[in-house]
Amino acid sequence: MGLKEEILDLERSCLEELGHGLDNERGRNDKYRTEYYRTFRGNLYEQMEQQHIEEYGGGSGGEMKDKRYPAKMSSIRSSSAMTFNLLGNRTAIIKQNPYGLSEGIYSVAYEKKMPTLLGRNPANLDAYLCLTGKTGKTEAIFCEMKMMEWIINTPGCLNNAYKDEDNYFAKLKPDGKTSVSAFLKAITMLEQVMPLHEIAKEVTVGDEVGINSKKVHFFQRYDAWQMFKHTLGIYNMTSRHTLEAMRDKYNNTSEVDVCEMRNKFAKVTLLNVVFEPPTKVIKDEKNRKKLIAFKASEHEEFELKFKSSMMESGVLQLFIDDCGFEFDIKYMSAKEFMLMLEMTEDRWNYLSRYRLEK
């Protein structure tokens, strides 16, 4: 039994103990029977309100629709299901915490669209939490949630379009400089600390089948390029230097409300929340050692390589200079995240499926 299978087995056992065992009616030989609920609703702590169903329905991930395969949100390892189960409908209460996030009642929205480059589809942030302060300025937390992606998948690479200054929304500042230079510098710095991988892909030209390969940079575990794109998306929606180009592209559509986030925030945090199974629950020694190594790599790649590059390149400083607020990028486990949320005992017990502990 591999690491993925052992973790899934632990999840199934936990859900059965909670009285939420899988209800899939597919045949016993169907591999989806051991990972998916019959519908996404079986995978949720509470019924999802219509506004959030519409938010997920507008996302690009096909979270709720059965197509060739079952809907993503019906899987017990769905990060979108974990996101909703942690935060719930409409509002979430954050308690006093050691992470520098303000206490209060935050409004909650899902699958928030954040444009990255001209001519490309917006990125979707898993959750958007907003707290209105006494001065009228708000504090925002944008969440990127990971369940088992960092354990079983290879992080994505960066499209070359991000290396071309002409593809960015940001326009020249009065001093003749552009904020794009900080993002381009971040790309260079990240590539310098990332391994170079060769990716082979089978291609067909006419009757001939061949292999097309290319060399790209990405980390072993941490999905840095996705977080880079999310940072760029938040900058685009809050910087005065992108407003004109953003309006030209989006003002006549309902795809993105360009002015919604302009001059609104006093503080913004991009928060990476990651499901981290406790090492002690993994019984197979080989799998346990693998998980220990994966966690070490995930943490090191975030803190010592990704975040340091975003700081040293000047990207984080851009938010103070161009957007008028402090911006930070944080990483925490799903357990650490739920510990700072106020919730009922019943919900806390249900969320043990993401802590894998009694």
Image (spheres, rainbow, N blue to C red):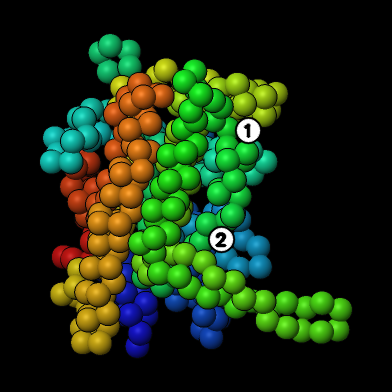
Dot 1 crowding, Cα within 10 Å, few <14, some 14–19, many 20+: some
Quarter holding residue 22 = bottom left
Going from the N terminus, do you reach mark 1 or mark 2 first? 2
Disc number for residue 195: none
* Residue at image location 65% in from the left, 63% down from the top: 67
For residue 127, side relative to residue 7 (left or right): right
The residue under label 2 is 71
Measured as percent of width and height from the top left, residue 125 is found at 46, 43
Q: Is residue 323 above or below residue 39?
A: above
The numbered mark at residue 255 is: 1
User: Residue 90 location in percent, x, y?
Assistant: 39, 33
Percent x, y for residue 259? 53, 20
Residue under the image location 35 percent in, 62 percent down = 193
In the image, residue 124 sits, relative to residue 18, either above or below, namely: above
Query: Image quadrant for the C terminus?
Result: bottom left
Is residue 287 depicted above or below 53 in this figure?
below
Residue 271: image location, x then y, percent: 32, 44
The answer to whether residue 164 is visible is yes
Nearer the camera: disc 1 or disc 2: 1
For the image, the number of numbered tags is 2
The answer to whether one can see residue 9 in this image is no
Q: Is residue 171 left or right of residue 83?
A: right
251 left or right, relative to 175? right
Give SS at disc 2.
loop
Judged from the image, the secondary structure of the residue bearing numbered disc 1 is loop
Query: What kind of residue is marked 1?
Result: Glu
| The furthest residue to the top | 135
Residue type marked 2:
Ala
Q: CA distance from mark 1 to mark 2?
A: 24 Å
Q: Quadrant of residue 137?
A: top left
Please tell me how crowded label 2 is: few (under 14), some (14-19), or many (20+) other residues with Cα within 10 Å.
many
| Residue in the image at 30% along x and 43% along y | 311
